[in-house]
Image (cartoon, rainbow, N blue to C red):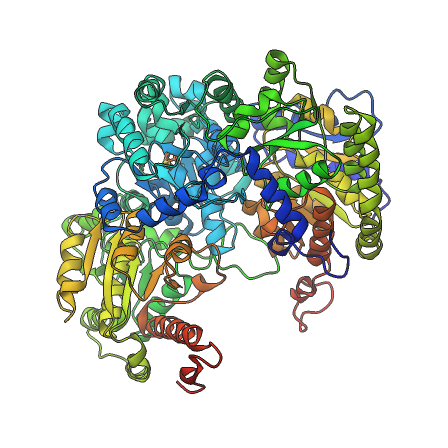
Amino acid sequence: MGPESLEERQKAAVEEVLKAYPEKAAKNRAKHLGVGGPEDESQKTCGNVRSNKKTVPGVMSQRGCAYAGSKGVVWGPVKDMVHISHGPIGCGQYSRAGRRNYYIGTTGVDTFVTMNFSSDFQEKDIVFGGDKKLTKCLEEIDALFPLNNGITVQSECPIGLIGDDINATSKQYAKQTGQTIVPVNCEGFRGVSQSLGHHIANDTVRDYVFDGAPKVLGESIEPTEYDVAIIGDYNIGGDAWSSRILLEEMGLRVVAQWSGDATLKEMAQTTKVKLNLLHCYRSMNYISRHMEKEYGIPWIEYNFFGPTQTIKSLRKIAAFFDEGVQAKCEEVIAKYQPMVDAVTNKYRPRLEGKQVMLFVGGLRPRHVIGAYEDLGMEVIGTGYEFAHDDDYKRTKDEIFRSTVIYDDVNEYELEAFVKKLQPDLVASGIKEKYVFQKMGLPYRQMHSWDYSGPYHGYDGFAIFAKDMDLAINSPVWGHSKAPWESEGEA
Amino acid sequence: MQEVENIVNGQKLFLREEYQEVLENKKQFEGGMGAINPEKVEEVAEWTKSWDYREKNLAREAITVNPAKACQPLGAVMVALGFENTMPYVHGSHGCVAYFRSYFTRHFKEPTPCVSDSMTEDAAVFGGLSNMKDGLKNCAALYKPEMIAVSTTCMAEVIGDDLFAFAEAAKEEDGGEFLPEGYPITYAHTPSFTGSHITGYDNMMHGIMSQLTEGKKGEKNGKINIIPGFETYIGSIRSVKAIVEAFGAEYTMLGDHADQWDMPAGDYKMFAGGTPIEAAKDCINAEATISLQKYSTVKTMKMVQKRWKHAGGFSNPIGLKGTDEFVMKLAELTGKEVPQKLKIERGRLVDAMQDSYPYMHGKKFAIWGDPDFLIGMVSFLLEMGAEPTHVLCNNPGRGWEEEMRALLDTSPAAADCHVWAGKDLWHMRSLLFTQPVDFMIGNSYGKELMRDTGTPLIYVGFPIFDRHHLHRYSISGYDGGLNLLTWITNKVLDQLDEETKDIASTDYFFDVVR
Ligand code: SF4
């Protein structure tokens, strides 16, 4: 490292990056880039960045759309319902089975998560409207998949532009059949990213699950004092399961998972719980607030990445309950501590001081920082695809050192930051993965856990540590340079 | 709990007793039928395997379930990445572009550059002109491409944006700062509510070829143009080039994305390889144009044949006969004898086919994919004496069904070979249960069919997300034929081992020599 401090280098990198833009774009992007300090009270948001604004056109943003936020994130994992990608063929195909929302069920019979149902719009549906086709789709799904517990209609871009009324169509069909049909107006052009899709989807849960009185199979549950729901865990690689086990061990009863491995019934019964546990604040704060207001259910945010945050969160959750739960919580912490110590002792020396740059969505840009720091790794840059101010405010409490903050970072910027700041590991999504690997940089996908995981909870932390070691210490990165290349050349 | 010396990921973690308990315990809160009444699930699962279900399934008119096709701009992005230093630019929603990039990246394990101009609600009302003005300028400033190739998402198509006028307006407003006079901005309308990804391929290829060659018609340049089509096998492009080069022919591969999706490690550059723009501008003056995929280049080839009056035409170099035809076409166009190198390669392939034929002969196959891929693959299966029982194409073009039928009719087993045009993979599931086959050939979506029906899957097609590096190989030319033969034969042998490996019961047939 040169004589400059990390912070100075970060500030210089931000300035440098902005130079490449035409004036108007530079002005815009300047507001989304900054350097956050852990103890800097003067900053309104971490790095003082602005967020949740329109993406600058033409820059290769990593963002997705409202449909992705609704179908891909909130509704798609609900396993006993069929989710129609309503419109042309593309969206549903590209988003099929890519997110690793694990679930237990007989796919195609009583569960449907990894399948793709598309109304496959043709020109005539655009010209004459697709409502009739939608009704036919609903009928055919009920005939061929009789064990579905409901159907959601996920609107793709054209729906809202051609004047279709999926709400009326769905309502009519629901009335005729008594089925739960949820129309979701999550067209991709609404809002600026996935984020509005989360919100729209949350609102439809409110309207069609809570207010819609869906028929649910089996007996309704008898509430207990210890009922909680996991909200905003999509069970990627089984994350919700490795979280659930801890909550159950401390004497709580997890009545529902939202929405990884979820069923409609679990969601409908959540209004009876004592406390909502919110992991991904961004995608499900809306419905949590609604349950607080309408049903008086408090909610708390927690973080199950890495032992430090996990322990903090377990205690925070236990504090809502009686001493029995609190005592058990301490037992759980004590039970896992030797394993965590063993993992940290093994991997920390191999990872100590390695620097990391993150770029992810939802909660991870701040939530996983602690897990890295538990391993002695240093997060020096982070940013969100689709965060709002409240996320960047929360980020202030999670960073450990001067950190470059980039909102809605694009390919150009991320590449430039990495080249300037030279981290040892980049952790982001599939679209960026091979860019950095080609540069010879270790990389982990932090949306899909790179087909590993789970990463939540104690058991997940062990996997996380092992995976980070695997990435950083693999011999493959040393092969890029051929033996005949002389020093300095590369 | 994890043990530090043996940290396992979810695959084994969730098999542990404590997690099995968690999963079992969760069921009491679930409302899925599996938790309430597992017998009912079994009963319905059985029903989905029946002829009764098959008939209802095949009668579907509205809902597509598990399709085997994608949307237009995906194909347009592929075309753009086949030209040197060209940025695919999609006018419309950026969500679509995130999908195209991740879809290709998951398949090729390579970066896929592509920008969008991020149209949102206000653009839906006022049109996307200002997005396009800013977008083209920012794209040119940041990434400095030599050409920008514009296609459209559904959104821009529904509101009816005029690409040509917008591109002109963008240039004018820019005043030459980032988009100088004559800077190539090619474009194509790619509405996803008609056709599929191969239609988008056709539209963009047509757009680039017609727009770059405007006013360029002149002396013949003596070259042959080759259009690969929506080719997802990098090795196939290289095989085809090697064949043309063996003839010593001058040629232009139009839309050559082989190097873009096969970059060596070391340094990252956004663009690699591709048809030089200058060569593309001159493609109108070639002697001939050969398209390797008829159904992916309908509109493009109409222009080439009707307006440009090029010789050439279609040639599908998958399988022995397909490659023979391609080679003969080149011999005819170049007026040269078939080179010795190719004669030897052909001989080797035939030799290999004669070595392995007993294992493919009479085996029943189900196969799905794009229309040209299927024509090539089915003719190869027939050359080996295999029976393509179910041939399914979700995105057939006009005339495909008849062409495939005629091809299957050359088989002695013609009566048992079925063509399924416009059907999807949930139809395929019914077909596999009611008229089972020995093997399936297809993409990663076949995985669920493999799980449900127990039919072994041979990975050939697009997309392939869960097997590595297959796309680096060739399935075209004589060498590509050898790859296909190797993959298929060895899968048959793997399966034979699988079925004969039970100790002291079936393992008398578990031969070490086959
Ligand atoms: S909105 Fe249209 S263009 Fe975009 S992914 Fe969906 S089908 Fe394709």
Q: Quadrant of ligand 1?
A: top left
Q: Is residue A13 above or below residue A484?
A: above
Can you see residue A400?
no
Which residue does the image show at 78% across and 29% down from the upper left?
A318
Residue A363 in percent (x, y) is at 66, 33
Can you see residue B309?
yes
Residue B356 in percent (x, y) is at 32, 81
Which residue does the image show at 34% across and 41% down from the upper left?
B71
Instruction: Farthest residue to the bottom: give it.
Output: B513
Q: Total marks drawn?
A: 0
Q: Which residue occupies the foreground of this view, A311 or B482?
A: A311
Q: Is residue B455 above or below residue B138?
A: below
Q: Which residue occupies the foreground of this view, A441 or B458?
A: B458
Instruction: Farthest residue to the top: give it.
Output: A293
Residue B7 in percent (x, y) is at 71, 57
Q: Is residue B155 above or below residue A373?
A: above
Tell me which corner region of the image, top left, top right, bottom left or bottom right, holds residue A399: top right
Which residue does the image show at 59% across and 20% down from the upper left?
A271
Residue B102 in percent (x, y) is at 49, 45
Tell me which corner region of the image, top left, top right, bottom left or bottom right, holds residue A283: top right
Q: Is residue A418 above or below residue A18?
A: below
Q: Is residue A33 left or right of residue B296?
A: right
Q: Which residue occupies the foreground of this view, A211 or B356?
A: A211
Q: Is residue B5 left or right of residue A67?
A: right
Quadrant where the C terminus of chain B sits is: bottom left
